[in-house]
Image (cartoon, rainbow, N blue to C red):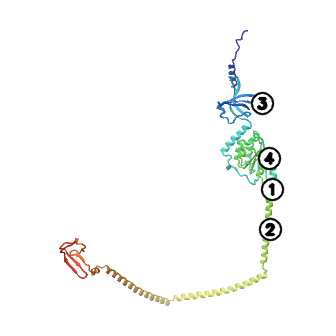
Amino acid sequence: MKQNPQRDIYSISRLNREVKTLLEGFPLLWIEGELSNFKSYGSGHWYFSLKDQASQVSCAMFRGKNMLTKIKPRDGMLVQVRAKVTLYEPRGNYQIIVEHMEEAGEGALRRAFDELKQKLSTEGLFDSQHKKIIPEHPKCVGVITSASGAAIHDIISTLKRRFPALPIILYPVAVQGDASKNEIVAAIKKAQQRKECDVLIVGRGGGSLEDLWSFNEENVARAIYNCTIPIISAVGHEVDFTIADFVSDHRAPTPTAAAELVSPDQRAYQQQLINSTKRLNQLITAHLKQQQQQLKGLSQRLIHPSRHLQDMAQRLDELQTRYIRAQKNRLNNDKIILQGLATRFALYDPAEQLQQQHNKYQLAYQRLQKCIQQRLKNKTQQLTYIGHSLDTVSPLATLQRGYAIVTQHDNDKIIRTSKKIKVGDKMVTQLSKGTLFSTVDKIKS
């Protein structure tokens, strides 16, 4: 049998190589599936399979990529991977090489929730210092929720039961789906612009994490934070927490609880009204009783006109008597003043003045004589004392006690030592009585 020279025969290696080239022509793909047969080797590489209900595919994720993965893979976990398609040539196995892995479904949402929560917390959007005070007695309540959901019915029924007079303004929005987050943001801005209410309830009924996800969006959180109206977050049930709960001014576990928070209890108001009415009645009764007692006292103090005229006549007589007495006292005072003036006038009479001056002169002359005599006596005693003191220190007194004063004849200098004279000098010796003139014949030291 003759061979066809045009036949192109592929080796296995060539086939696998070209198939690999074709498969690697695929762009990077996002693939979702369930992890199975997961194995981690000492080299750090991961090998596993991804499967769905009908098929599975072999996967490999090398150490340099899986070190950046934030999740811990395990069999049965639903994941999303970003990978490229390739072929393992030695065995001819079709496989995918994973570059990134994350949880799919609720797991991915939970991770996104944690990341956004950490980001906003770091920025300070959850800080208590930014929380606004919920008014104790709001004049109007705004509700941002679905117009047909259970939340609005719970809020309305609760407010009617607790305080029917409190007005409610509904800002209807979708509470799940792609467009819901933008509707919620727009409703918050609209309420802030209109300024119709002084507190807002933002929320919805319960559901899965995916159902509640609109309240975990960043733009919703920032709209709540930037709103000047106090906002109460009421999303889901008590166990459900959203980003809106953390950034709002107050979190209510349910929409019903939010309605109870913003509305006063009419039963408490009724009881307060009853107590106030009772106290007011007591005050009025006490006031009337006091006024009756005061009226009774005034009636007892009321005087008959005739008695009043008698009192006035008696008062007139008393005033007349006091007037006559005052006039007499005034006349007596005028007489005393007149007598005083007459006495003062007599004192200023010229003869009296001359007599007074003469008396003053005599008195001054006598005082002067006494002063002169006393002064002479004092000076005499002082002079005697000074003479005695002078006599005590006088050289004459010293001479009288046997001492003498020796001076040189030619210059009258006092000689106090023998070293100042020499044989033949002439000296003068002053005695108590008389003077001696002598010549030195001999000196003895």
Secondary structure of the residue carrying numbered label 4: helix
Above or below, comparing residue 431 to residue 202 in the picture? below
Label 2 and label 4: CA atoms lie apart by 48 Å
Residue designated by label 3: 53
Q: Which amino acid does label 4 sit on?
A: Ile
Return the x and y of residue 336 as percentages of the image width and height.
59, 87
Which of label 3 and label 2 is nearer to you?
3
Tell me which numbered mark, 3 or 1, is placed earlier along the sequence: 3
Tell me which numbered mark, 2 or 1, is placed earlier along the sequence: 1
Tell me which numbered mark, 2 or 4, is placed earlier along the sequence: 4
Residue designated by label 1: 267
Please say if the residues under marks 3 and 2 sit with CB atoms less than 8 Å apart: no
Residue designated by label 4: 152
Tell me which numbered mark, 3 or 2, is placed earlier along the sequence: 3
Label of residue 285 in the image: 2
Above or below, comparing residue 98 to residue 277 in the picture? above
Residue count near mark 4 (Cα–Cα under 10 Å), binned few <14, some 14–19, many ≥20: many
Tell me which numbered mark, 4 or 1, is placed earlier along the sequence: 4
Secondary structure of the residue carrying numbered label 2: helix
Label 3 and label 2: CA atoms lie apart by 86 Å
Secondary structure of the residue carrying numbered label 1: helix
Please say if the residues under marks 4 and 3 sit with CB atoms less than 8 Å apart: no
Which is more toward the observer, 107 or 216?
107
Label 2 and label 1: CA atoms lie apart by 27 Å
Residue count near mark 3 (Cα–Cα under 10 Å), binned few <14, some 14–19, many ≥20: few
Task: Place residue 313 in its image quadrant.
Answer: bottom right
Label 4 and label 3: CA atoms lie apart by 41 Å
Which of label 4 and label 1 is nearer to you?
1
